[in-house]
């Protein structure tokens, strides 16, 4: 199938043909012939009732430039075939990773912290996801995190939220719970077993009646996870590694602290004497 070239946009040749399925839309992998890159193409059945909402969401997402968000390249609704062309996000989804069991804490924390930072930038521009699931976050072959479906997935499903930011924050909490336990605490998600008991309330109201936000989620992660989020870890988790054990990560952190302490200058005799007598040593 070749999408009609419009307004100077790149021609796109797909690897899959046929009409959109009964749900009214389809997403498939295609090739941008001009730039020779893989893209994701959404096509729609004639008369799809939510096409206006989907196009509006896609155009809003196209203004965002955070590399952790899947980019929207082209949106067309003025021809007989409406379509959306987006970045092809390579790699495995969180759901794919969880098929082998829960993630190690470091990897889970890093993945969700990156997603939280990406969504925080989107919230600053007035755009929200509102439909987060284990399929919304991908881990690329090079160890990068990518959030897909920003605004578009919710529009395709007809989902709206009174408080989109809060909806995303609770969604991030559900993703973190799933990453650490291998169970899904939200609505039915067939690939994962449902959580039980309190797991269904993964994110609760902030103390004092305040609001949790995506921006606030990252800093609350454990110390080493915060290092991964900020890119300051001296020993980052290899992208190809399935995860390091918690004990091993703690050992590496302790080794790093000992190394830093060993590089400090030894105290002079004068400084040691003053410290012993309670006085201040001149730096």
Image (cartoon, rainbow, N blue to C red):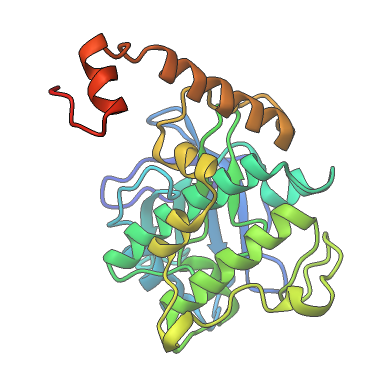
The residue closer to the viewer here, 47 or 200, is 200
**How many callouts does the rendering have?**
0
Q: Residue at x 83, y 66 (%)?
A: 190
- To which quarter of the image does residue 262 belong? top left
Q: Is residue 263 above or below residue 152?
A: above
Q: Residue at x 43, y 86 (%)?
A: 208
The residue closer to the viewer here, 118 or 252, is 252
Q: Is residue 269 above or below residue 255?
A: above
Q: Is residue 3 visible?
A: no
- Pinpoint residue 115: horizontal percent, then vertical percent: 49, 53
- Pinpoint residue 119: horizontal percent, then vertical percent: 42, 60
Q: Is residue 267 left or right of residue 17?
A: left
Q: Is residue 228 above or below residue 196?
A: above
Residue furthest front as drawn: 277
The residue closer to the viewer here, 221 or 11, is 221
- Pinpoint residue 192: horizontal percent, then vertical percent: 83, 61
- To which quarter of the image does residue 191 belong? bottom right
Q: Residue at x 80, y 56 (%)?
A: 182
- Pinpoint residue 81: horizontal percent, then vertical percent: 48, 63
Q: Is residue 233 visible?
A: yes
Q: Residue at x 42, y 19 (%)?
A: 260
The residue closer to the viewer here, 187 or 258, is 258
Q: Is residue 54 above or below residue 263?
A: below
Q: Quadrant of the C terminus?
A: top left
Q: Is residue 207 left or right of residue 98?
A: left
């Amino acid at each position: 199938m070749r999408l009609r070239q419009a307004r100077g946009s790149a021609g796109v040749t797909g690897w899959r043909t046929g009409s959109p399925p009964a749900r009214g839309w389809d997403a498939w992998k295609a090739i941008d012939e001009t730039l020779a890159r893989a893209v994701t193409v959404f096509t729609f059945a004639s008369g799809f009732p939510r096409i206006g909402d989907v196009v509006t969401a896609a155009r809003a997402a196209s203004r965002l430039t955070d590399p952790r968000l899947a980019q929207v390249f082209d949106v067309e609704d003025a021809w007989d075939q409406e379509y959306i062309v987006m970045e092809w996000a390579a790699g495995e989804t969180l759901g794919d990773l969880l098929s082998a069991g829960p993630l190690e804490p470091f990897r889970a924390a890093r993945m969700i912290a990156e997603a939280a930072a990406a969504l925080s930038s989107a919230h600053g521009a007035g755009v929200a996801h509102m439909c987060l699931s284990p399929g919304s976050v991908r881990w690329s072959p090079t160890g990068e995190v990518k959030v897909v479906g920003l605004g578009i997935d919710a529009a395709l499903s007809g989902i709206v939220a009174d408080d989109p930011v809060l909806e995303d924050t609770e969604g991030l909490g559900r993703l973190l719970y799933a990453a650490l336990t291998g169970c899904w605490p939200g609505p039915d998600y067939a690939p994962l077993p449902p959580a039980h008991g309190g797991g269904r309330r993964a994110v609760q109201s902030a103390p004092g009646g305040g609001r949790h936000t995506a921006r606030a989620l990252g800093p609350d992660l454990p110390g080493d996870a915060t290092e991964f989020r900020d890119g300051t870890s001296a020993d980052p988790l290899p992208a190809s590694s399935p995860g390091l054990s918690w004990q091993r990560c703690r050992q590496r952190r302790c080794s790093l602290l000992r190394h830093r302490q060993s590089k400090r200058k030894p105290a002079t005799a004068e400084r040691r004497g003053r410290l012993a007598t309670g006085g201040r040593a001149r730096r």
